[in-house]
Amino acid sequence: MKNNFNDMSVEEFRKNGFKLVNWIADYLKDIEKYPPLSQVNPGDILKRIPQTPPQSGEDIEKVLNDVDKILMDGITHWNHPGFMAYFNSTSSAPGILAELLSAALNTNGMLWKTSPAFTELERSMMNWFRQMVGLPENYWGIIYDTASTSSMHAIASAREQLNLGFREKGMTGRNDVPRLRLYCSEHAHSSIDKGAVTLGIGLEGIRKIAVNEKFEMIPEKLEVAIKEDLSNGWKPFCVVATVGTTSTTSIDPVEEIAAICEKHNLWLHVDSAYAGVTAMIPEMKWITKGWERADSIVINPHKWMFTPMDLSIYFTRKPEVLKRAFSLVPEYLKTKQDDEVENLMDYGIQLGRRFRSLKLWFIIRYFGVEGLAARIKNHIDLAMEFAKWIDEEKDFERMAPVPFSTVCFRFNPGSKTEDQLNKINERLLEEINASGKLFLSHTKLNGKYAIRLTIGSIRHKRRHVVDAFNLIEELARS
Ligand SMILES: *Cc1c(COP(=O)(O)O)cnc(C)c1O
C-alpha cells in the first residue's frame, strides 16, 4: 500500500494532525481523570507491544488509537495537578506548540550556516532570559538538554582553565599533574558526581562539605578543606554551590563561597536548576546574591517555567574557556562565515542540536515576564500556606525551612522511636501514592524519613493543595 516512496500525504497529515491536536486538548482538559502516578507493574506495557516490528506499513490512525490502548496506563502524568513529587516539570500549551513546530522545521543548529535563525534566536533568548533573572551583560548563555549536561560542561571548563594540557595529553599515565579536587555540599545533586566521573576527576576527587542545620554549605569548612587538600598535594579547581538543593531546596551562601573561590582561583559553578527561575520575582531577587561573581550558572526552564522536556540554560562569564575545551572543527564543517558568526557546535560535546529556543520564544511571549513571575510567586505562596498547615497540625512536623515551593514534613504522632517514625512515614507515602490522586516523593534528612511536596505545575490551584493536605491527613489518621 505504501510503496510509492512518499511521506504521508498532505491530506492524511492534515487530518491526523487535527485529530492529534484534539486528543491533546482533551488530554489537558481531562487530566484529572487519570491517576498522577501510573499504577502498572513492571513489564505490563512491554507485554502489550508486539515483539517484532510490522513488515508493511500500518495506518497512522491505528497507531494513534494505540496510544490510549497501550501506553496511557503506563504514563505517569507530570502535567497532573496531583503530581507534587520531585520538581514537577510541567508543559504548557505554547511549549507544546513550539515542540511541534521544532519537529516540523527539523533544523539542526550545529553551525550558523545550517540555520541562521536557529543560532540567532538562541542568542536572543539567552539575552532575554539573562535580563529576566537579572544577570549582568557579561554572561553568555547556551541551551543544553539537562542540568546534568550543563554542570558537566561547567566542570569541563573548570578543568580546562587549569591549563594543564589535558586536551592534548589526557589525564592518565602522567606524573606531571596533581590529582584534582572539586567541592560541593553534602546536598549537591548527584549530577555533579556524574560530571566528575565522566571527566576523569573520579568520585575521590569530590569533597563533600558539611552543611548547617538549614542544610546550607558551611563556608568555613570549605576553606579548611581547601587548605588541607593544598597541603596534601591535591589541586583544588572547582566549587559547586547549590541554590535550591534537591532534598530541601536549601541555599548555599554564594557570596561567601565566591570570596573563597576568588582567593584560591577556583571556578565557581552555581547549580540553580530548580530555583533559578524565581529570580524573576522582585521579592526573590536576594537568592542571586553573589551570582555575578560565579563563573557559571545553570537554570532549567524545564523544571519550573512550564517548558516541555527538555531545556536547560547554561550561563558563563567565560565562553572562551568552554570553546577552548570543546572546539574542534573538521574540514567538512568549515564555513566562509566562521570569523563573523557563532557556531554553537564549538561550545560543547554535541554536534547536532534541537531547536529548543523556540520553546522559550513561544512561552516568554505568550505569558510575558510578569505572567511567568506571577505564576511562580503564586506557587511559593501556596507552599508557604501548606507549610503553615503542617506547622499548626500537632501530629505533623516540618523537617526543613521552605525558601521556595517545596515542603519536607513527616507524620509524628508522638511516643514513637525514630525507626518507627521512618517506617510509618514510608508506609504513609506508599498509601498516598497508591490513592490515584496524589503523587509525592521522599528524602532522608539526618537519617529521618521525610515526605516531600512540591508545587510548581502550571495547573496547580489552591484547591489542589487543600485536597492534598486533607488526603495526607486522612491517610495518616487511619
Ligand atoms: C533537577 C536538578 C538537577 C538535574 O537536572 P536534569 O536537568 O534532570 O539533569 C541538578 N541539580 C539540581 C539542583 C536539580 O534540582
Image (spheres, rainbow, N blue to C red):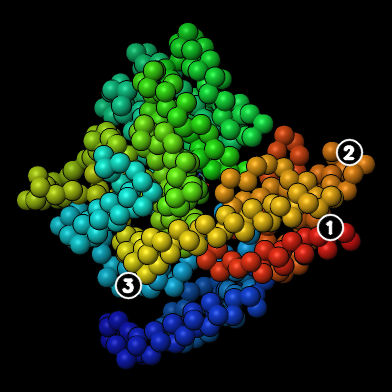
Helix or strand or loop: what does disc 3 sit on? helix
Q: Secondary structure at mark 1?
A: helix
Asked whether, in this view, residue 317 is left or right of residue 288, the answer is left
Q: Which residue is mark 2?
A: 417
Residue 65 x/y as whole percent: 53, 84
In the image shown, does 321 or 131 lie closer to the viewer? 131
Question: Residue at point 66% right, 69% down?
Answer: 463
Structural distance between the alpha carbons of marks 1 and 2: 17 Å
Q: Quadrant of the N terminus?
A: bottom left
Can residue 109 be seen here? The reply is: no
User: Is 212 on the left or on the right of 240, as rendered?
Assistant: right
Give the farthest residue toward the right. 415
Q: Quadrant of residue 186?
A: top right
On screen, 94 above or below 353?
Answer: below
Residue 439 picture quarter: bottom right
Determine the secondary structure under disc 2: loop
Kind of residue indicated by mark 2: Thr
| Contact flag, marks 3 and 2 (Cβ < 8 Å) | no
Other residues around mark 1 within 10 Å, as few (<14) / some (14–19) / many (≥20): many
Q: Are marks 1 and 2 in contact (CB under 8 Å)?
A: no
Disc 3/disc 2 C-alpha distance (Å): 56 Å
Residue indicated by mark 3: 101
Which residue position holds label 1? 476
Q: Nearest to the eye among marks 1 and 3: give it.
A: 1
Amino acid on which the number 3 mark rests in the picture? Leu
Q: Give the image location of residue 418, x and y in percent.
A: 84, 38
Q: Residue type at mark 1: give it.
A: Ala
